[in-house]
Image (cartoon, grey):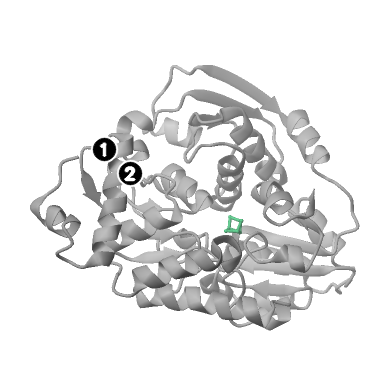
Amino acid sequence: MHLTRGEERTLAGEEGPSRQKAIELLVALGDIYGAERLIPIASAQVSGASFKTIGDAGIRWLEEMGAEGYASVPAMVNPLGMDLRRWRSMGIPSQFHSKQVRIVKAYQSMGLLPVYSCTPYLAGHRPRRGQHVAWAESSATVFANSVAGARTNREGGPSALAAAIIGKTAEYGLHLDENRIPRVMVEFESIPAELIPIAGYLTGKAAGNRIPMVTGLNMTPDDHKSFGAAVAATGAVSMYAFDGERAKGRRAQGPYDEKICMDSSDVKRCAEELMGGSDWDLVAVGCPHCSVRELRRMALKLKGKKPKKDCDVWFCTSRKAYAACPEAVSVLRRFGKVLCDTCMVVAPIEELYSRTATNSGKAMVYLPTLGRQKASFRTTDQLLEAISR
Ligand code: F3S
């Protein structure tokens, strides 16, 4: 890999051990993947922020890096294991809380922004088309590449933090044109909007590690958010192209290795297979974090209704979205907890619940594994009906 003089100095430790460790990591990755150089990034987004996922070893590593490492570009953080303000009402044990606070302090000491969300692009940090960034959260990465038109690999937590500290990343993978070419065509026909998360779930499975070109779905930004999250959860892929973009001539036109067609019966069948039981102890919405529009829409549907109280309800969102629509939040709070900074997967949900219903294709992958839940898929409207009367 070719390094500039300044980068060589950083690598030699002339700017301190944290920057040295960070650039060593970037160079090692660059060597593995055949990068020729480091390139500047506009922002970073770091995963590995919940005590549940990183444990004591992760805290020690962050505190070591935080002793003198400092972010040199705007850098956001993935959701934590708890809402920083409402952790008690979530049922988080105080021991977990104190470990989580150490993680937050370590990130803060490195100058990372207190944006603990998987939707930084809805919280004032949407990258511009063509910008290089180093984001770690899989659903945010896929949104950045596919919808915002930025360029990022799916970083690991440590490599995203290293990129934040150096302000650069190794130029390989999705930073390069030749690796952004769709290889499989996935054509949908007549898919109901509420099943778009399932369309994403099926697309990721069909695509595997190939970038899919998706046609036949007319998606809003919120639909892209949930579609892409599911694609990245069931597939090893951090980008999709879609026909709206192709029409603008910005995407490669093939040829494709394979063409897959799915109609509404395929998608409905998959949704039925994921339905599971209906004796939930938690209904969890907001994977990825709800947008302001989604919070308002749900509040509108619930206004004038009464809560059923058969089970707990979590609406997960970013602090920015929470603050932007206090009226919607106050309606939703009658039905459950509106949580910021955290989510149903990285919170210690397995200590609190065992059967969770969700409207998220991505959560249907991770709730049974990371969350040890019996998970049930329902559309947003079905969940709102189930929690109200
Ligand atoms: Fe976000 Fe948590 Fe889902 S990080 S995408 S809400 S698993």
The answer to which image quadrant residue 51 occupies is: bottom right
Q: Amino acid at mark 2?
A: Leu
- Residue drawn at x 51%, y 60% as measured from the top left: 119
User: Does residue 124 appear in this view?
Assistant: no
Circle 2 sits on which residue? Answer: 29
Q: In front of the other: label 1 or label 2?
A: 2
Relative to 51, does residue 182 appear above or below in the rendering? above
Quarter that holds the N terminus: top left
User: Does residue 24 appear in this view?
Assistant: yes
- Whether ligand 1 has any atom under 8 Å from the Cβ at mark 1 is answered as no
Relative to 151, does residue 283 appear above or below in the rendering? below
Q: Amino acid at mark 1?
A: Ala
Q: Position of residue 380 (x, y in %)?
A: 74, 55
Q: Secondary structure at mark 2?
A: helix
Quarter that holds the C terminus: bottom right
Circle 1 sits on which residue? Answer: 35
- Whether ligand 1 has any atom under 8 Å from the Cβ at mark 2 is answered as no
Q: Position of residue 336 (x, y in %)?
A: 76, 73
Front position in the image: 125 or 299:
125
Q: Position of residue 40 (x, y in %)?
A: 23, 53
- Residue drawn at x 69%, y 76% as measured from the top left: 92
Ligand 1 placement by image quarter: bottom right
